[in-house]
Image (cartoon, helix red, strand yellow):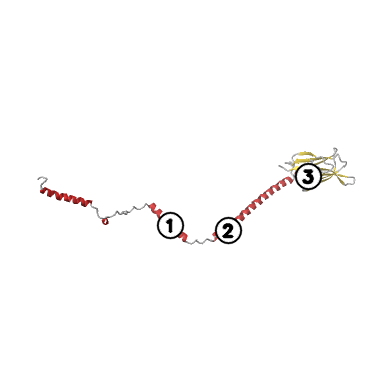
Amino acid sequence: MSAGDPITAAIKTPEKASRKQKKKTVSRKPPPRWRKYLVQAELELPPPAPEVQRTAATADDDEETEPMTEASEVPDLRWWQTTPVVGALVLACVLLAGLAGWSLRRAAQDRAAAVAADARVTTLTLRAINSERTLRITPNPRSWSARPDATIDWPEPPQLLELQLPVGYSSYLTFALVIDKVDHGRVMVIEHLSPDSNRELRLAVNSSAFGPGEYRIRLQGYTWRGERVDAGWARLVVDAPR
């Protein structure tokens, strides 16, 4: 059969027509009202880890308790938490601190007084001597000297001090010796003391009997009537032990 045969044309014509219809059917778009838009599908998520669950639960509890705490009333304070009691405790602490400071100060003063008293007892107690020492002092025949006539350190250990007082300038044959300690009082009075052949008055004393300080020695001569007349003055200074 040739291509121009009518039977062949009749067979091919419906096939072509059906192909065209199929193409048109596939390529045709439905009207807008029939179109279905894409919808996001909600998929189930896997369960969270245990730690995440505990953290979320704690956060939820905090969120729930915070407004409750703010809204709840302030609990009543105990008696020892009130303002008057706390103020009284603070005041008591301040008073106790002041009392402690005052006590420490008084204790320091008492300690210093005890040390001074111990030193005075040591210097005023008569103790045995272990050596001798000669001290020559020339009295002033007119009055007290502006400066000490002799200055010595307080002997430690004690010594036997032999005082030599030359009285060759005076015509008296017997003398009285009066020793006073400045700011304290009279220490010694010796009467009817005669000079030796060198016209010197000699007197030996224990140094422990004389504490540190200034001593004033006054010489008085006896007249033929037995009266005492000033005949010389001397100043002796004993320095405190170091």
Between residue 64 and residue 238, name the one nearer to us.
64
Relative height, residue 60 to residue 130 (above, below)? below
Q: Residues within 10 Å of mark 3 (few under 14, many from 20)?
A: many
Q: Can residue 237 be seen from the camera position used here? A: yes
Residue highlighted by disc 3: 215
Q: Residue furthest left?
A: 1
**Counting other residues with Cα less than 10 Å from the Cα at mark 1, is it few (<14), some (14-19), or many (20 or more)?**
few
Give the answer, above or below, for where 165 lies relative to 82: above
Q: Residue at x 76, y 40 (%)?
A: 152
Q: Position of residue 235 (x, y in %)?
A: 79, 43
Residue in the foreground of this view, choosing between 217 and 97? 97
The residue wearing badge 1 is 63
Q: Is residue 14 left or right of residue 174?
A: left
Three-letter amino acid code at disc 1?
Glu
The mark nearer the N terminus, 2 or 3, is 2
Percent of width and height locating residue 140: 83, 41
Going by the image, does 73 lie left or right of 33? right
Q: Quadrant of the C terminus?
A: top right
The residue closer to the viewer here, 81 or 233, is 81
**Helix, strand or loop for disc 3:** strand
Vertical placement of residue 166 versus 9, above or below = above
Residue 206 in sight here: no
CA–CA distance in space, label 2 to label 1: 37 Å
Question: First in sequence: mark 3 or mark 1?
Answer: 1
Callout 2: few (<14), some (14-19), or many (20+) C-alpha neighbours within 10 Å? few
Q: Quadrant location of residue 155?
A: top right
Q: Secondary structure at mark 2?
A: helix
Q: Residue furthest front?
A: 4
Q: What residue sits right under mark 2 in the picture? A: 87
